[in-house]
């Protein structure tokens, strides 16, 4: 199925919401003489998060601590993997880290450092998720996964009734699946559906780089500790799995709290492929903020708790989201557009669990209509 150009948004009511909002946000940056990209806080954060991934691994090799302590180091690495994913590579691959394409590319490839693929991620996230948020068959991030259902438009199965119980276990498998198989699956998928527009020669070159990167990643993380430092492979493997389980749960939960919670919509295009809504208002209807007032959460999750601001202004570095959030909220109220948010992390988690529970029992809207 070709996805490119399949669905488009039609601003039937000629809403002036986004032009007005964009003008006000532009004025904030120009009047305060603030660049939209990274500041000192962002640079320091990036260094801290990268070191939280690299230093524990070096400590494992250099000191070879007892197994309980080594697991703690792997645990910290998991926190680092998630932090890099949310706070470093994410902004860079959106072009929001720096005005320099070279710097954005370098920081964006920190995803490759933790076993992923920056190229695939841009196709899945920047093109599909950000353009077609919560549109089933278009937004790959809400596609059903094995025993998990994230859309009211897909077929409900008997085991989905318990997904609110077992979902978090499967969330922990996300990054492990990513580094082992997901990039290869997406390579084939994005070629078939037209999202990957590279030439055949470019794709052959990229696929070779992908294989090389995977070999290097697994060699360094799994083989080097055993072959060159004599650490038992079982200990290394268990630590590796713990690292990815920690990173997987964090990354998946943070994402789900922004889109798979109560109050969000899941619109479907009509028979002509049209969604009769302004794209920006669609983002407001499908995206939820959480814990906006928590500085600790905002620091660690890379502003992904300001998901509304991120979806509207993805090329603005996340360190600026707290400042522009009030502008977005006030403008939304002026145009009678909902500004969806959960005030605390706990409220957001409960809302997500309630949505999993509802989707686990809710018949497909297509079946209900039929």
Image (cartoon, rainbow, N blue to C red):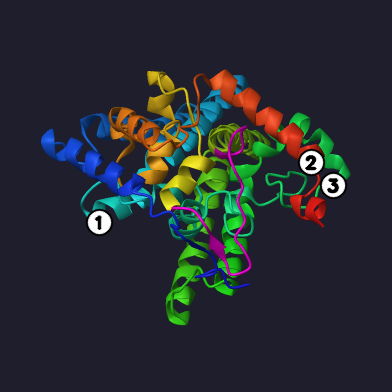
- Which secondary structure, mark 1? helix
Residue under numbered circle 3 = 157
Identify the mark nearer the N-term, 1 or 3: 1
Up the image or down, 341 lies above or below 13; here it is: above
SS state under label 3: loop
Query: Residue at the location (71% across, 35% down)?
Result: 356
Question: Does 220 sit left or right of 157 as displayed?
Answer: left
Q: Position of residue 327 (x, y in %)?
A: 30, 32
Measured as percent of width and height from the top left, residue 334 is found at 35, 33
Instruction: Name the front one of labels 1 and 3.
Output: 3
**Residue at coordinates 81% horizontally, 47% vertically from top-left?**
156
Q: Badge 3 local density, few (<14 within 10 Å), some, or many (20+)?
A: some
> Quadrant location of the N terminus?
bottom right
List the residue tagged with mark 1. 102
Instruction: Tell me if I can see residue 69 in this picture.
Output: no
Seen at 62% across and 43% down, the residue is 174
Q: Which residue is mark 2?
A: 362
Dominant SS of magenta comes to loop
Residue 213 place in picture, x, y as percent: 48, 58
- Classify mark 2: residues with Cα within 10 Å, few (<14), some (14-19) or many (20+): many
**Proximity of marks 1 and 3: CB atoms separated by less than 8 Å:** no
Foreground mark, 1 or 2?
Answer: 2
The magenta-colored residue range is 259-278
205 part of magenta stretch: no
Q: Dot 1 surroundings within 10 Å: few (below 14), some, or many (20 or more)?
A: few
Indicate the position of residue 62 as horizontal and vertical percent values.
Answer: 44, 31
Q: CA distance from mark 1 to mark 2?
A: 47 Å
Quadrant of image for the C terminus: bottom right
The residue lying toward the viewer, choosing from 342 and 59, is 342
């Amino acid at each position: 199925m070709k996805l490119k150009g399949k669905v488009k948004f039609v601003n039937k009511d000629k809403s002036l919401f986004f032009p007005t909002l964009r003008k006000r946000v532009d004025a904030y940056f120009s009047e305060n003489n603030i660049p939209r990209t990274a500041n000192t806080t962002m640079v320091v954060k990036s260094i801290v998060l990268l070191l939280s991934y690299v230093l524990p691994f070096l400590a494992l090799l250099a000191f070879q601590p007892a197994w309980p302590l080594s697991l703690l180091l792997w645990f910290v690495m998991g926190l680092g993997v998630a932090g890099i994913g949310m706070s470093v590579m994410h902004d860079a691959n959106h072009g929001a880290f720096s005005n320099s394409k070279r710097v954005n590319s370098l920081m964006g490839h920190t995803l490759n450092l933790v076993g992923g693929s920056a190229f695939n991620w841009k196709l899945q996230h920047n093109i599909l998720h950000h353009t077609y948020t919560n549109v089933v068959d278009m937004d790959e991030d809400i596609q059903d996964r094995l025993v998990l259902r994230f859309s009211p438009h897909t077929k409900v199965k008997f085991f989905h009734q318990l997904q609110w119980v077992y979902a978090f276990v499967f969330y922990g498998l996300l990054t492990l699946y990513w580094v082992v198989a997901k990039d290869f699956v997406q390579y084939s998928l994005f070629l078939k559906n037209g999202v990957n527009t590279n030439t055949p020669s470019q794709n052959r070159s990229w696929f070779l780089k992908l294989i090389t990167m995977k070999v290097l990643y697994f060699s360094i993380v799994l083989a080097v500790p055993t072959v060159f430092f004599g650490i038992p492979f079982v200990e290394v493997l268990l630590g590796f799995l713990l690292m990815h389980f920690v990173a997987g749960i964090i990354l998946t939960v943070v994402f789900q709290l922004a889109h798979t919670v109560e109050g969000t919509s899941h619109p479907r295009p009509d028979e002509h492929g049209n969604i009769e809504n302004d794209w920006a208002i669609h983002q407001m209807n499908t995206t939820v903020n959480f814990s906006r007032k928590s500085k600790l959460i905002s620091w660690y999750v890379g502003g992904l708790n300001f998901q509304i601001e991120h979806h509207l202004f993805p090329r603005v570095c996340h360190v600026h989201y707290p400042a522009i959030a009030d502008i977005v909220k006030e403008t939304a109220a002026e145009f009678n557009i909902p500004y969806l948010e959960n005030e605390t992390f706990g409220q957001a988690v409960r809302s997500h669990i309630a949505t999993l529970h509802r989707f686990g029992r809710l018949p497909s809207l297509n079946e209900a209509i039929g």
